[in-house]
Image (tube, helix red, strand yellow):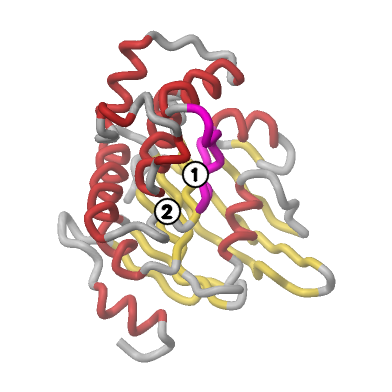
Amino acid sequence: MQTKTVIGASALTVRLDNRTILDNLNFEVGKGEVFALLGGNGAGKSTTLKTFLGLTKPTSGIASVLGKNVALHTNDVQQSVAYLPESVTLYGHLSGLENIRYFLSVAGLNKSDNEISVALRKVALQENAWNNALSNYSKGMRQKTAIALALLRNAPVLFLDEPTSGLDPAAIDEFNALVSELAANGATIFMVTHDVYGACQVAHRIVLLSNGKLTGSFERIGDTPIDTEAVHAAFAGRKA
């Protein structure tokens, strides 16, 4: 996608305990793009995510978000993005509505009940669950609550960590449709995952990460999803 760079890695390198975790990463993610970093366990996905969130400092090179060097402007970047971890951290004893109101208040944001209702409907969280305790929510319902919160924060960038892990096929399809809609409305989505099928269905671009190095990339052409078999073959280390 030929659009303004929102997320960028320039010669990004991270070394921890004399080990190279990320090795000279270079890529750009544009506005409205769904970008998937695909890799197995130990590939460096989590470190990449932590570096863009300002939780890990690069040894060399630059990680940038919204035109800012994350290492130099960590607080600004963290306040401008939304992060959806693999296990969403919300309060189980509070309802979906109560969680959203609480976290909005912590962020100093004042949203009306109508605005909150619109966000919850947008993410297709069943209305009869809004006032139920989060302890009774499925993982997919928790994710929808967290995404509704991100929508209410008007975050232009979303970082997603293994977003479809533990979801059933129907929930995965719902999640992918929501991500696609967010991107169509201008949000930039950066997801790290090992789910080849899910990445191919939703991503505009997939980049493979192995042992801290970028080893291949695939790009969607028009509305046709990226070829799952080709990505799986490359991911498994075979020739496509």
In the picture of the structure, the residue carrying the numbered disc 2 is 163
The quadrant of the picture occupied by the C terminus is bottom left
Which secondary structure type mostly characterizes the magenta part of the structure?
loop
Which of marks 2 and 1 precedes in the sequence? 1
Which residue is at the far bottom? 238
Question: Hey, which quadrant is residue 231 in on the image?
Answer: bottom left
Identify whether 93 is placed above or below 58.
above
Residue at 31%, 44% (x, y): give it.
179
Residue at 61%, 73% (x, y): give it.
42
Residue at 65%, 52% (x, y): give it.
51
Q: Amino acid at mark 1?
A: Leu
Q: Secondary structure at mark 1?
A: strand
Q: Nearer the viewer, residue 19 or 172?
A: 172
Q: Are marks 1 and 2 in contact (CB under 8 Å)?
A: yes
Magenta extent: 81-94
In the picture of the structure, the residue carrying the numbered disc 1 is 84
Identify whether 176 is placed above or below 130.
below
Q: How many marks?
A: 2
Residue 132 locus on image (x, y percent): 38, 29
Q: Nearer the viewer, residue 143 or 157?
A: 143
